[in-house]
Image (cartoon, rainbow, N blue to C red):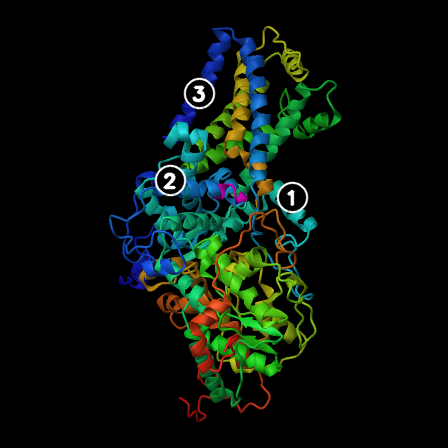
Amino acid sequence: MGIKFSLLAVLALVLAAFLGVEVVGMNYFFGVLVPYVAFFLFLSGFVYRILKWARVPVPFRITTTSGQQKSLPWVKQNKLDNPTSKVATIGRMALEVLLFRSLFKNTKMEFREGPKVTYQWEKWLWLAGLAFHYSFFIIIIRHLRFFMEPVPGFVHTTEALDGFLQLGLPGLYITDLLFLAAVTYLFIRRVIIPQVRYISLPADYFPLFLLLGLGITGVLMRYFTKVDVIKIKELAMGLATLHPTVPEGIGVLFFIHLFLVSTLIAYFPFSKLMHLGGIFLSPTRNMPNDSRIRRHINPWNYPVKVHTYEEYEDDFREKMIEAGLPVEKE
Amino acid sequence: MASVPKANELIAGTDHKPPKTGWMDTPVDFKPGTWCYAGKSKNLQVVGLPNPREWSPADEDWKLPKNWQETIHDGLKDRLGKYRSLQLFMDICVRCGACSDKCHFFIGSGDPKNMPVLRAELLRSIYRKDFTLAGKVLGKMAGARELTEDVLKEWFYYFFQCTECRRCSVFCPYGIDTAEITMVARELLNLIGCNIDWVVGPVANCYMNGNHLGIQPHAFKDMIEFFVEEIEEVTGIKIEPTFNRKGAEVLFITPSGDVFADPGTYTLMGYLMLFHEIGLDYTWSTYASEGGNFGLFTSHEMMKRLNSKMYAEAKRLGVKWILGGECGHMWRVINQYMDTMNGPADFLEEPVSPITGTKFDNAKSTKMVHIVEFTADLIKNGKLKLDKSRNDHLKVTYHDSCNPARAMGFFEEPRYVLNNVCNHFYDMPPNTIKEQTFCCGSGSGLNTDEYMEMRMRGGLPRANAVKHVHEQHGVNMLSCICAIDRAVLVPLMNYWVPGVDVTGVHELVANALVMEGEKERTTDLRNEPLEGMEDSDNEDL
């Protein structure tokens, strides 16, 4: 149900852009207004969500420790998996954010007769996740050439590296392939692994279809039905410099692509995609495990009702004296 | 109590395929053996928990307060503003499924709601309905649903089917910790009086009597003195422990389970022997006679209320620092909560071992040292005379208890001690130890008899790894540093891996410990003959 709903939603978006531009001629709406609104929603939504999270206190130091603690001087601490310093914590976070280290630990449980439980090598999710995020990132860098004049050197370098295979004309970007392959894999595994399918919501399929739609329209434009890149750059530069214009004669495919991007970024802050920002705030990862060394302060710590020693002794004084236990009041 | 199917029958028919009906449309089946008895009215009253009444989870009517939905809604709202972990973990899960097969209850039961991600969704779905726009507008399409009595029953069932072991949080790419979610869900359940007696009973006992078992001060002293006699029989040495003694250098606190039941009692004898041998100036307390803290399994507030006794007693007695025994969740509380909740402990001194002079820098602020750190330091400095061969009748493996593993990172110290007190030590496979260790299946207050089927299911991954070293190396002793483990691994081993016994690390230390003036030892602490001593006369047997 979630799959159909999400697929239909994305197809509806495609159709809306197609009809809007081809039939109604709402080029300005899809080329300028929608991207601006989407960008505004993205920025404000992103900031709002981060501030909303950051405003909530972290009352306790609940680091998940995944390596040897700092203890006696001759016991070797695993500083990255169980940091006590800021630097090591940053290192742990960097590995998490840049290399998806926790996901790299993934295994697959196998349950056999006996019963015998074993844990198998399983790096595909990690690999696909990494491939997807990095190719998406590189594709975004490459797209900067539409928004900048002159095009900065690092964008050229990225393009050159990405196209080093020099296959076909225009040259094939490896990240285009990787992006589509990875998103397809992430979709397929969601459907065919029964447990993952069972937990999947429309909110899981929808972004995947959006990304696939983005990738497919992008690839179509670059490699198959040529669009007027000069005019697209004119539009993009107009958006970036706040002097929006919509040149005539840009193919409808571009508007579909742009509408999908706009949807993605507008949807971003209100969805699970915010894990991009959330990971940095994750209390089990972003704090050192040092709460025995330095006192962690809970801003809302409040006094609680306790059963004091005096009350305890009052309850048991006779028995304590009889048993020869020292008491405060004879 | 429901009878538990035989080991070979229990898992037959367990597959991990989800049912045909969606999880929101699959109600809970309260099958005997898979849920715990309700908290008794009198126990709730002792600590002032809401809605005390007699009820059972198997009842149709749970006798909930009239405005229970509102109470839960307000409770959740309050906690979303207090715990960043909760707010974040409600928002950022992408349902990648990396956690799904990491939970021992899922592995052992195949029930999809035991996948950590789905366990969290049980709460998340209500959060979405009550606190997100998409959930309010799109409802089920956005993964949101109304909080009904069926949902509440589902919460009770599955949040008391999570041991807060945090194994899933090791694998989550965003560090989402199901324990945080379970802890909050249990707090919410407690707001309307839905707790289990195996948690609230110990809480009430601990609050009034100082320990979970409700042992009164004079009886506590008696029980320790009984062990003194036992020790004298094995070693010929008379030990004289002190209680509630002001001016001692160190206050020693350990879980009361070890005072009460085998095999934890042998570990406790181990502490007594070790402290005697090194001449530690320490005292027991009858008021702070509990290391464990079932408040952790009730609410943050209850955790704080029970934990407060440690510092209060240390202050009253005027000790310099606190030494803590082998216990799992106790050390999660000490490492991650105690100082924040009940500190600063500025009336104590930074712990220094009086025997070796070692300064425990890692406990600079809490002023509380783990007994295994303490002993490892003694051994490293050559302060103990150890005869490893006294453990030669044992082939030992080590179970990393969840909390010292994933809420502390306590891996090498116990292994160092074990390797110094026994000749035959074999670790279980890497995917089942250290930060990837599997829960005993009975943690977080679920170690009750009526829950036996689920405990055997949840303990399967742990037992399975023990079985591996049992078959490979002939391992016959499973060591651990947790009192709940010592209580629950015994039935677990009997069920899945007969022939493997359970011990604390300090029982093995005491076996190997050569004490000044001791008689020739012919048995270990359990009165089992030592290797090569099988034929010697043993009048005690």
Kindly give the residue lying farthest to the left in the view shown. B60
B423 vs B442, nearest the viewer: B442
Local SS, label 1: helix
A255 vs A305, nearest the viewer: A305
Label 1 lies in what chain?
A
Residue B91: where, in percent of width, then height?
50, 37
Residue at 42% from the left image edge and 25% from the top image edge: A7
Marks 1 and 2 on same chain: no
Residue B499: where, in percent of width, then height?
40, 73
The amino acid marked with disc number 2 is Glu
A324 vs B412, nearest the viewer: A324
Disc 1 and disc 2: Cα gap in Å? 42 Å
- Labelled disc at residue B308: none
Q: Is residue B223 left or right of residue B21?
A: right
The residue beneath circle 3 is: A11
Reply yes or no: does residue B28 show up in magenta. Answer: no
Q: Which residues are magenta?
A: B79-84
The residue beneath circle 2 is: B70
Q: Is residue B71 left or right of residue A250?
A: left
Question: In the picture, residue A179 is in which quadrant?
Answer: top right
